[in-house]
Amino acid sequence: MKLEKRAEPSALMVYLSPVLALLATLLTGAAIFAILGQPPASVMTAFFIDPIRDFYGLSELLLKATPLLLCAVGLSLCFRARVWNIGAEGQFILGTLGGGVVALACNDMESGFGWALLVASLAGMAAGMAWAAIVALLKDRFDCSEILTSIMLNYIALQLLLWAVHGPLKDPAGFNFPESALLVEDLLLPTLHPDYRVHMGLLVALGAAAGLWLLISRSLLGFQVRVFGESSAAAEYAGFSARAILWFVLAACGALAGLAGAFEVLGPVGQVTPNLSAGYGFSAIIVVFLGRNHPVGIVLAGLLFALTFIGGENLQIEFGLPRSITQMFQGMLLFYLLAADFLINYRIRLPGFAAREARA
Amino acid sequence: MKSTTRLELIGIGKRFGEVVANDGIDLLLESGEIHAVLGENGAGKSTLMMLLYGVLQPDSGSIVWESREVRIGDPATARRLGIGMVFQHFSLLQTLTVRENLELALGALDAAHLESVLRQFDLRIDLDVRVGLLSPGEMQRVEILRCLLQDMKLLILDEPTSVLTPGEVEQLMHILRRLAEGGCSVLFITHKLAEARALCRRATVLRNGRVAARLELAQCSDTDITRAMLGGEPPPPPTLAPMTAGEVLLEVRGARAALPGQHRGRIDGLDLQLRAGEILGIAGVAGSGQDTLVALLAGEIRPASGSLLWRGEDITRKGARARRRLGITTLPVDRLHQAAAGGLDLTANLLLTHCDDSAYRSGPWLHWRRVREAAQELIVQAGVKAPSAQAMARQLSGGNLQKFLVARELAGSPRVLVCYNPTWGVDPGAQARIHSALGEARSAGMSILLLSEDTEELYRLSDRLGALCNGRLSPQLPASEVDSELLGQWMTGSTGNAAA
């Protein structure tokens, strides 16, 4: 058996492969549940259908999708430029810290909460951007692999967060729990509807996706990012500064991931806690690939991923299955997606097949 | 000596996906024979040699080595059989000396054996110098020496002369003749007729992966051979009317520069004047500083010292886009990764060097529809075979992409074009088209700096001619006053480079 590169991958299959990967994931998931002795049909329903049966469920889906989308839009920009930033998680965490510190400082104010909210959001963006800037600096000055540095910075960011909630940010009245004080109601992002938790961050996320589309398909800057992603030599030849593009995509991604982090603190969570990120920064990487690095695809993939988060929680409640089901589904989805993409670019030739063909 | 069959290839076939690289190739090689394998770029010559050296495995057919069918699974097996290969791109370690490189490949050296081989083949090699300091010709001799020390029975040379100066070519031929007299067979891959004639009695011509002809070279005219290689008549050369050159457009003064992170190919105190309405041809073996010069003129790199003047105005600090706005365009040698982005379509590749044209952009926003229309127009006008302007650059053949790129650079009436090997690896039809496009541009008053490793092309097109060697430029004289001997001297730097 050997692998053979296809002359030109099928354009249709490039868009179909996420669908195929999803189908394969569902089938494998059902099989695993059956092996575990759970009725596959009802588990799958509980995972994928029950969470979105009513408006409240849908609003929770949109709430979960918000940070995913913000991170994914930033990552999409990086990946367009072939800057393999795996550090959205760390940039997100820095965003929670930046936003959290500012918001907590404003917690005792009498008025001006609107401004405080804005400044806290901007602080989150700035903190995420600064974290991403470390990656850019190391790449720019020392040609360090952005993959390695951004992954390592994720761990540092997590330790930083743990230190903060065990130390300076810990709520004095919090019974020694590693958590900050709760933010006052006025310091939280306005929700889109009084009955639901989904907040205006969703609009910002959708706006970012629209902005990404505009940038990539209509602007000179987006064109430069694409050229750089295809070939940095071509970008230099055209007179586009490779350094400027590197800094731009990383800064933009850091800002968006940081904003996502700040929105979690200022939104549904309302305080700084050690496990603010449910792995949004990592999941967003899969969202970008599943969404074929296209803004519309990313929005759809982001919603699907939000569903796996909620569905996993639902299974935990209804069937007592471990919460890692969510990660299992995300992992399977990525595995099948990579497999499908691989087979789009390569075909498998079995021994004897070529000979038969030659005789024919 | 009695001639016996050393190697026989029977019906060799090899495909890469949809592409058939070799199809039913038969070839017979006697001991002590120097056999030419002729063909255009992409005819399947290199693939065939990779199969023979065990780098690739054939899909069909058989290899008979000294009357025994063999399977050559890897290069080590090939070497054990007595098959050696000298690659187009050398496989020596730059930081080690010649002796260390040889020992690395062969183990401890037998000094007497080494001495006798060096004497027998008249090889002048300093064994204790670092490989990184050698010229391409010298490196090639080291590779050949490495094969000779292993008592090879077949030596494969893939386009060995592309990096050599005319003098070094003579030296190589001398070595190969000696080798053949000793009974070693040689497969000499080339697309240059003169070399094949000088060295070989018989030739196998490949075209589109098949054997197009087996020729006794003495009985064929050049036209016969070219026809076999191309499968048709060779295109006529363009005729350039003599012109008096106009004002000096671009001037380089005492420039020293290097590509970032690269030690080889720097330019070292270079002076140059480009005038309107002339083609200045610059010869030179690969790596003499051509890439650096193109990048310097394009504005991709800044000189360490020296300056660039545009009609008297200092433009040393201006970047690529600013220079393009002045009318200076460049076409670097790497078509798919530098002059174009292979994974983008032709529309985007047109925009690559025209993103500052007011028709295509207002402020930060692009007018893709206009770019697409312009790209379509360019495709038709330049006779590019492409399905549409949405075709990706890498889907096009080398010749078609290059036609598109030349047309792209000539669009918008620039004043200066700097190009390096514009017709390398391009089919003859496209080559003729590119040559006439360059000729027309020059006659319309443009100034063209033509860097090329193809001396035939240089003589055909140039008004003035010079050569680069080790980053220094020879004097540039009217092409009619430069014979190939003088050009060869310039390329090796033996005279005339004190002009800087």
Image: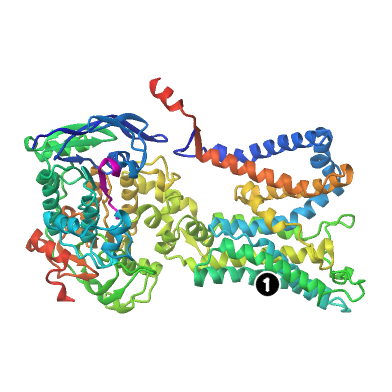
Residue at 37% over, 38% down: B73
Residue lying at the far top of the rendered structure: A360
- Name the quadrant containing residue B233: top left
Q: Which chain letter matches label 1?
A: A
Q: Position of residue B457 (x, y in %)?
A: 18, 53
- Residue B182 vs A246, above or below: the answer is above
Quarter holding the C terminus of chain B is bottom left
Label 1: element kind: helix
Determine the residue positioned at 63% across, 60% down. Answer: A74
**Left or right position of B140 against B361:** left
Can the viewer see residue B343? yes
The spot of residue B89 in percent (x, y) is 30, 54
Q: Which residue is mark 1?
A: A126
Q: Is residue B405 magenta?
A: no
Question: B130 or B160: which is nearer to us?
Answer: B130
The answer to whether residue A121 is visible is: no
Q: Nearer the viewer, residue B70 or B85?
A: B70
Q: Say which amino acid is labelled 1.
A: Ala
First to last magenta residue range: B79-90
The picture places residue B476, in percent across and down from the top left corner, at: 15, 68
Residue B111 falls in which quadrant of the image? bottom left
- From the image, which quarter does the N terminus of chain B lie in? top left
User: Does the stretch in magenta take in B81?
Assistant: yes
Give the image location of residue A251, x and y in percent. Answer: 61, 68
Local packing at callout 1 (Cα closer than 10 Å; few below 14, some 14-19, many 20+) is: many
- Colour mode of the rendering: rainbow
Total label count?
Answer: 1
Find residue B209 and report its image quarter.
top left
